[in-house]
Image (cartoon, grey):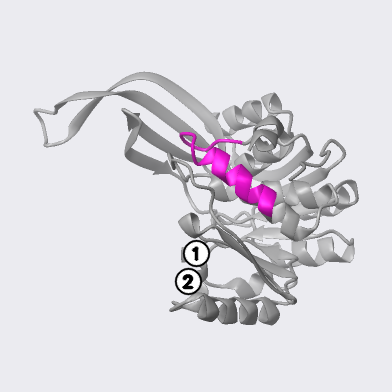
Amino acid sequence: MKVPDTSAARVLVVGDVMLDRYWFGDVSRISPEAPVPVAKIERTEERPGGAANVARNVAALGAKAALLSVVGADEPGQVLARLLRESDIDASLHEDAGLATTVKLRVVARQQQLLRIDFENAPDHEVLKAKLAEYAERLPQCDVVILSDYGKGGLAHIAEMIRLARAAGKPVLVDPKGEDYARYAGATVLTPNRSELRQVVGRWADDAELAAKAQKLRADLGLEALLVTRSEEGMTLFRERGAEHEPALAREVFDVSGAGDTVIATLAVMMAAGQDMAVAMRLANRAAGVVVAKLGTATCSLAELQAA
């Protein structure tokens, strides 16, 4: 399968950003203070997470990535802004003093995650209202919109964002969270994983029941498509004309964190480059196969996708 030219593709990402911090070290003893391992940290790493990782994946695939989000007026927010600049992302990060930038700190020893510590606070006030005007201004300069919902409060106006984008003739891809999918009505594509979909439609006994439930949800929400990522079972694209399935690529799975970000980013870039949704799904499946073989939130470059 040929990978298209993505250099003219423009993707606008809106959503909840976070900073992923990694502390790498070794464990050789148990603490005398409590029955817990002692990790001796040897190096640290910082990477953009959440919607920022989606934007990073868009840029890695050779497309132009713009990002709209909110961070706290704090050190992690400044680090995130620097990392995004270094990744060649046109980021507009609104600083809010009443908000702490979300940080996920992972302690890793011998390629195994020992512990994850989350630093975050839910916004106690409206944080993205000011972004709506800028969002509307930026719509004409993009081909596809990604709304990356991590349930952190940054997408309180998602229904209005979907309406504005569709009125401007832009496809809207949503990575959903929670049980209330009614707020995503009218989007072009939703990309839930297997467990996220189960939260909304309940369990299914076989592929036929999954298809019935997925198609009902797609029709109820007025979506063009529902792309369900199914881990080792691959991914299935449900459209009005029926379902198309792409099996998982057989390779060693190292870390699935951030794989959903890669899937929605690849789907958006390929659609922005003029590909049909089914072709875009096949390329997204290949890109996901590349990133799950890497540790932590990672990206798939254009060269890696071509090689895959």
Q: x, y (%) of residue 111?
A: 35, 31
Q: Residue furthest top?
A: 42
Q: Position of residue 296 (x, y in %)?
A: 47, 36
Residue 252 numbered tag: none
Would you name the residue on which mark 2 appears?
A: 198
Disc 2 residue type (three-letter):
Arg
- Quarter of the figure with residue 184: bottom right
**Magenta residue check for 2:** no
Task: Look at the numbered discs 2 and 1 and tell me whether their residues touch, using CB distance below 8 Å.
Answer: yes
Distance from label 2 to label 1 (Cα)?
Answer: 6 Å
Q: Is residue 267 above or below residue 190?
A: above
| Region rendered in magenta | 282-299
At a point 51% along the width and 28% down the height, the residue shown is 46
- Residue under the image location 63 percent in, 36 percent down: 300
Q: Where does label 1 land, which residue?
A: 194
Residue positioned 52% across, 38% down in the render? 297
In the picture, measured across the screen, residue 62 lies left or right of residue 47, that is right
Of residue 138 and residue 254, the one placed in the foreground of this image is 254
**How busy is the neighbourhood of tag 1: few (under 14 within 10 Å), some, or many (20 plus)?**
some
Residue 28 visible in the current orientation: yes
- On the image, the x and y values in percent for residue 74 come to 55, 33
Please give the count of numbered marks on the rendered protein.
Answer: 2
Q: Between 294 and 206, which is closer to the camera in this rendering?
A: 206
